[in-house]
Image (tube, rainbow, N blue to C red):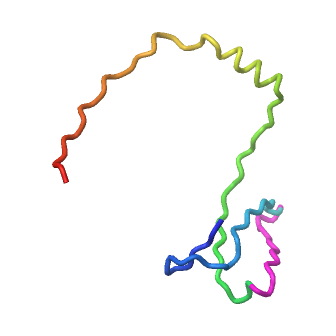
Amino acid sequence: MPVFNHYGKESDFMNRLVLTSRVGSDGTLRLDVPLGLAEADHEVRVTVEPVANQKSVSTTEWEAWVDEMAGSLQGEFQRPPHCDFEVRDSL
């Protein structure tokens, strides 16, 4: 993924990294990310967002869920009418 500097020009500056880490029992997140000497004295941005707890589902569980959902829609499918197209001046 190319990285662009604040002038909008492509830069050779470091690539985007995605790290997953766990907050310690003291509520502090500690990161040690060696980027190399070439990246020394550059600014970086760190964004912290929680990772959703996702339960992995087996193929059998997935197929059972799909079978359970089949036929659960009540009513008829309806397609609303199209809107009128905007009339524009020719160029």
Residue positioned 79% across, 71% down in the render? 31
* Occupied quadrant, residue 29: bottom right
- Could you tell me what secondary structure mostly forms the magenta stretch? loop
Residue positioned 71% across, 15% down in the render? 67
**Figure label count:** 0
- Relative side of 29 to 87, left or right: right
Dividing the image into 4 quarters, which one contains the C terminus? Answer: bottom left
Residue positioned 63% across, 74% down in the render? 45
* Occupied quadrant, residue 30: bottom right
Q: Measured along the vertical axis of the image, is residue 25 above or below residue 44?
A: above
* Magenta-drawn stretch contains 26: yes
Residue positioned 72% across, 20% down in the render? 65
| Residue at the farthest bottom position | 41
**What's drawn in magenta, residue-wise?**
25-38
Dividing the image into 4 quarters, which one contains the N terminus? Answer: bottom right
Q: Where residue 25 sits in the image (x, y, percent)?
A: 83, 61
Q: Where residue 63 sits in the image (x, y, percent)?
A: 76, 20
* Occupied quadrant, residue 34: bottom right
Q: Measured along the vertical axis of the image, is residue 30 above or below residue 43?
A: above
Q: Measured along the vertical axis of the image, is residue 27 above or below residue 85?
A: below
* Magenta-drawn stretch contains 45: no
- Relative side of 56 to 80, left or right: right
Q: Where residue 64 sits in the image (x, y, percent)?
A: 76, 18
Instruction: Name the residue nearer the viewer: 25 or 1.
Output: 1
- Relative side of 24 to 75, left or right: right
